[in-house]
Amino acid sequence: MLKAMKDFFSSFLLIISWLIFAVSSIFFIFSFLTVFALPIFLILFAIALLCFYISKKLDSRKVSK
């Protein structure tokens, strides 16, 4: 039960991180038009990186070489 919850949470965070990356890329484009979009872009990008990092830490499906 705990492993299934951990896998679900890992996948959920991965999907959320990619969605935030997509939104932050829009703010990156708008940051060239206005100065106010740059802090929003940086905050969203940092949150997306954090979600991606946590998702990878929780991922129990390690690839062995």
Image (cartoon, helix red, strand yellow):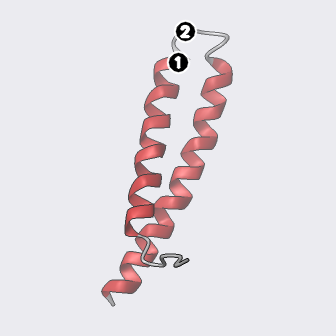
Name the foreground residue: 15 vs 56. 56
Up-down relation of residue 44 to residue 31 (above or below): below
Q: Secondary structure at mark 2?
A: loop
- Residue at 65% x, 19% y is 30
- Residue at 48% x, 65% y is 12
Q: Quadrant of the N terminus?
A: bottom left
Up-down relation of residue 35 to residue 45 (above or below): above
Which residue matches tag 1?
38
**How far separated are the C-alphas under marks 2 and 1?**
6 Å
Neighbours of disc 2 within 10 Å: few (<14), some (14-19), many (20+):
few
Question: How far across and down, in percent of the image, does residue 6 sit?
Answer: 37, 76
* Residue type highlighted by circle 2: Val
Neighbours of disc 1 within 10 Å: few (<14), some (14-19), many (20+):
some
Quadrant location of residue 7? bottom left
Q: Quadrant of the C terminus?
A: bottom right
- Residue at 40% x, 47% y is 50
Which residue matches tag 2?
35
- Residue at the extreme front of the image, as rendered: 65
**Label number found at residue 6:** none
Question: How far across and down, in percent of the image, does residue 43 sit?
Answer: 43, 30
Are discs 2 and 1 less than 8 Å apart at CB? yes
- Residue at 66% x, 31% y is 26
